[in-house]
Amino acid sequence: MKVEIYDAIMRRQASRRDILRGTASAAALLGASGVVGGFPGKAFAQDDLRAQILKIPGVGKGSPTDADWQKVGELCLGPTKANVAEGEFEGVELTFMGLNNQNQHNFLFRGFLKSWEAYTGARINWIDLAQADYNARLQQSIATGTVDFDIIEMGAPFEGDTAGRGLLDEMPAWVAEQIEADDLVGYLQPPVGTWDGKTYRITIDGDCHTFAYRKDYFGEGSISGMNEAPKTWQEVNAATIALKGKTDPLTGLPAYGYLDPLKGWGGFGFYFIENRALAYAKYPGDPAWLFDPEDMKPLVNNPAWVQAIQDVMDLIAADVYPADQINADPGTTAFSQFLAGTGSMLMWWGDVGSNARTSDTSVVGDVVGFGINPGSDRVYNRKTGEWEDKYNEAPNMAYIGWGIYVTKQVSGDEKKRKAAWSAAAHLGGKDLSLWTAAYPSGFQPYRQSHFQFDEWEAAGYDRAYIEDYIGSNADSYNHPNAAIEPRIPGIFQYYSVAEDELAKGFAGQYKSAQETADAIAAAWEKITDQIGRENQLKLYRASLGL
């Protein structure tokens, strides 16, 4: 998108609901600019099955249980039965590697696939990993050539490490038809999920980070002193400092502002410093924000990134975080703090939006609001080396969503191969995906058909809430300056070492934010040289469309 078009959109600063009311014109603009196309209108036909599964258990009826997951899986088995005969996979055993975070991911998959196993005759063995252990386990399997799983839950950033090394099985055509792959939102369609023109991924998630905030902290007469929720990181920081020493209006406990996770999370924690940095570093019209596309030199120690790190260091020095925040990883900030009533602002994936209203552990469902990644009142232009005093926004398409992939382990056995792809297709089915988007699952909306507000309202969500929550996802996916990370080999090696250096900086082991950023950049240079700079540069430029 040209900078002048972006600036015009930013000057307009239309509200989310204005944008949603004008979907047709917005879709035309975004489609012409090559960003994400618009979502279909409300005339999309209601489906009895979709309405039925959204009532399991029903919003406000408590957290879903294994019995609910099993029931949803059984009701959504129709597409499998159209492609697989009963008992067709008798005797087949498959190994599935995925996450066990927050009793979601693999826990749900077990329930969803129980009826699939009973119908097809196949059996699944599970490898369950904590988020912090995931990257190391996958990288070890790749490095040692000991891939011991047939199916893997994996994010698109790892496609360079897996598809790029020939470790994945190509998706059969019948699978794309069964899952209705053309229903994906635009930014998740190819090249995401593909490598060298071949498709390997069944998308089950549409990751982007959105801003969640407590509405009872903001407004006339509120404890923050702000009439509305912050729109920039400068305002987020000011509100966080202003709240020190005040009392939470919901819990009666100490009030806190923004919840930065200060502990690493197996590389996934790096996305959270990215949120801050992107508003400063992602210049409109320039796709590069991690590395220089001319030589793969890291950008992570330029003034924009240093400012993001300095913001956090300033808040640590001001002593405005909850006690022991230095040991709080992103899982803690979302599930143990924000949803449980500690803190007033955070950036996170869509889990916060669904869990706030459908999880027994949430106490903030009636007071939480949503928006896109806060902007900044100035942005750094890496090409001129100067700050520019103009408003800038850059939503973080963090992780590009989870997907289900099948490995080469099954490629020589057609029966086993079909079984693996059938299991994956069941988990990526169009109707089942609506349930995972609406309830705690580890996944957020990622299909065009997920943006039918009437379906969510019928499930028990109130209209204003769902317009706010789903709207923040739509605005992020469609944003003209959205930051989409590169699918290059070793991306989580970069992220993991960055987490290590950030932890040192936040603990005071480095003298400054600049020194911390320089340590990250030096470590990144070593990784690039180890992997091979020339090939990394080639793949990085391709991922940016250069």
Image: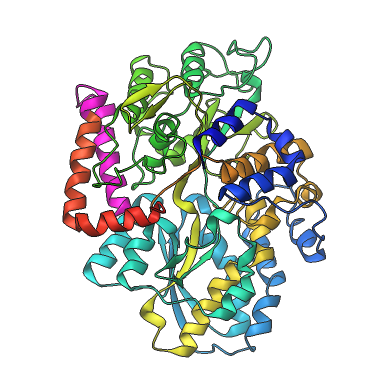
Position in image of residue 105 (x %, y %)? 52, 58
- The answer to whether any part of residue 355 appears in the image is no
Give the image quarter of residue 479. top right
Q: Magenta segment range?
A: 489-515
Q: Is residue 514 magenta?
A: yes
Camera-nearest residue between 386 and 431: 386
Placement of 464 over or under 203, stated as above or below: above
Position in image of residue 314 (x %, y %)? 35, 18
Placement of 145 over or under 120, stated as above or below: above
Camera-nearest residue between 503 and 93: 503
Marker count (numbered) = 0
Q: How is the image coloured?
A: rainbow
- The answer to whether any part of residue 56 appears in the image is yes
At horizontal 78% and vertical 65% (from top left) the residue drawn is 49
Q: Is residue 414 magenta?
A: no
Give the image quarter of residue 66. bottom right
Position in image of residue 305 (x %, y %)? 33, 31
**Main SS of residues in magenta:** helix
Describe residue 141's horizontal placement relative to residue 172 as left or right: left
Position in image of residue 247 (x %, y %)? 56, 14
Describe residue 22's horizontal placement relative to residue 295 as left or right: right
Camera-nearest residue between 34 and 225: 34
Give the image quarter of residue 465. top right
